[in-house]
Amino acid sequence: MKGLKRLEVLGQGDSIQKQTSTTLSYLQSWSKIQAEIRARRICMVTEGRIKQRKQENQLKLEAKLHDIEVIFFFSLSLNYLCCLLSTVTLSVLFHIHTSHVPFNILLPYF
């Protein structure tokens, strides 16, 4: 009976060792899977931040371009008005000169 008990204990020892080995293998696999999931999440967060920064930079760039366009068109408008006023002024002065109207009479209009 003693030998049979020893044989059972030895047999159980091998079985327990095999179960332990299998469990450790599964735990290692699970740990690797969790590490991959963590790495993917970090990558996704990083990509999201990069995308958000790109969008913010694009909006800033578009705002700057809009400001430049406004200034440019305002400058063009001012140039046009100056040319127009110069033309009108020259026309009036030419008219005054050719009509022989005294200049001091027209001064309040300028």
Image (cartoon, rainbow, N blue to C red):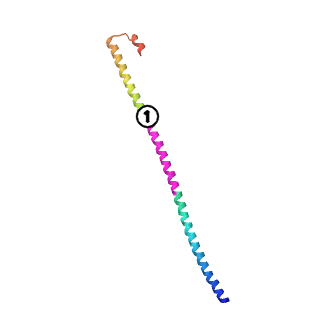
Residue 60 on the magenta segment: yes
Q: Position of residue 8 (x, y in %)?
A: 63, 84
Residue 14 figure quarter: bottom right
Q: Is residue 57 above or below residue 70?
A: below
Q: Residue furthest right?
A: 2
Q: Badge 1 local density, few (<14 within 10 Å), some, or many (20+)? A: few
At 55% from the left edge and 66% from the top edge, which residue is drawn?
Answer: 32
Q: Which residues are magenta?
A: 43-69
Front-lying residue, 94 or 20: 20
Q: Give the secondary structure at mark 1.
A: helix
Looking at the figure, which quarter contains the N terminus? bottom right
Number of numbered discs present? 1
Q: Name the residue at the front extreme.
A: 1
Which quadrant holds residue 98?
top left
Q: Which residue is mark 1?
A: 70
Seen in the picture, residue 49 relative to 1 is either above or below; the reply is above
